[in-house]
Amino acid sequence: MRRNSRHRTFLMLTVGVAVLTVVACNRRTQPQQASESRPASAPHTATSPEEAPATQPATRQREELPASTFDTHPPYTVQLYVRKPEDKQPGWLRVLALQDKDSVARAQGVFPRQNIIEVNTENIHQIQVELGYLPLAEGKRVVLRIDGQGIEITQRDRRFITLERRPTGRWEVRKTQE
């Protein structure tokens, strides 16, 4: 009986060593797979030279932006993605100033029904709306909803209206160009 017990122990040790050898070999040949399965937020500490991360140059890569677009058919959708106000901006919206010059500014505008303008922004300090492009009904009030805030706009022969975001986050009409 004692011999059978020794044989079982030896067999279990042999199987255990074999499993550890396979795991160790697999880990050396596929180090990326282990790091890919780790959550992005989990810190990584190298435990062996094979796992040490390669040194990367300290260059900052710029985020690839989608092209800004404008649909000339109702609801006249505008999608803007800009790094600076000089970037190409098609349509009836124009970013004039960014809040954070190191981040991308985004704006999306639609004209869902007559005299209603909807705009959503991200990282924008000043924006201009070209009223002259949109088919507004004369003599009727125009409502601009920008980032959820409603603003009634009087037309008074204005072609453009400029809005500025206050430090509180509220938008305010700044100036008019004719």
Image (tube, rainbow, N blue to C red):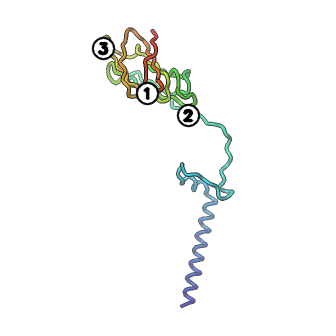
Of circles 2 and 1, which is in front?
Answer: 1
Q: Amino acid at mark 3?
A: Lys
Q: Which residue is mark 1?
A: 108
Q: Residue at x 38, y 17 (%)?
A: 134
The disc, 2 or 3, on the residue closer to the chain's N-terminal end is 2
Q: Quadrant of residue 8?
A: bottom right
- Choose between 63 and 103: the one closer to the eye: 103
Extreme front residue here?
Answer: 168
The amino acid pointed to by label 2 is: Glu
Q: Identify the residue at image location x=52%, y=27%.
A: 99
C-alpha gap between disc 2 and disc 3: 42 Å
Residue 140 marker: 3
Give left or right: position of 81 versus 141. Answer: right
Q: Nearer the viewer, mark 2 or mark 3?
A: 3
Element type at mark 2: loop
Q: Residues at badges 2 and 1 in contact (C-beta under 8 Å)?
A: no
Q: Name the side, left or right, on which 84 lies relative to 115.
A: right
Q: Is residue 91 visible?
A: no
Q: Residue at x 60, y 76 (%)?
A: 14
If you read the primary sequence from the N terminus, does the residue marked by circle 2 or circle 1 appear first? 2
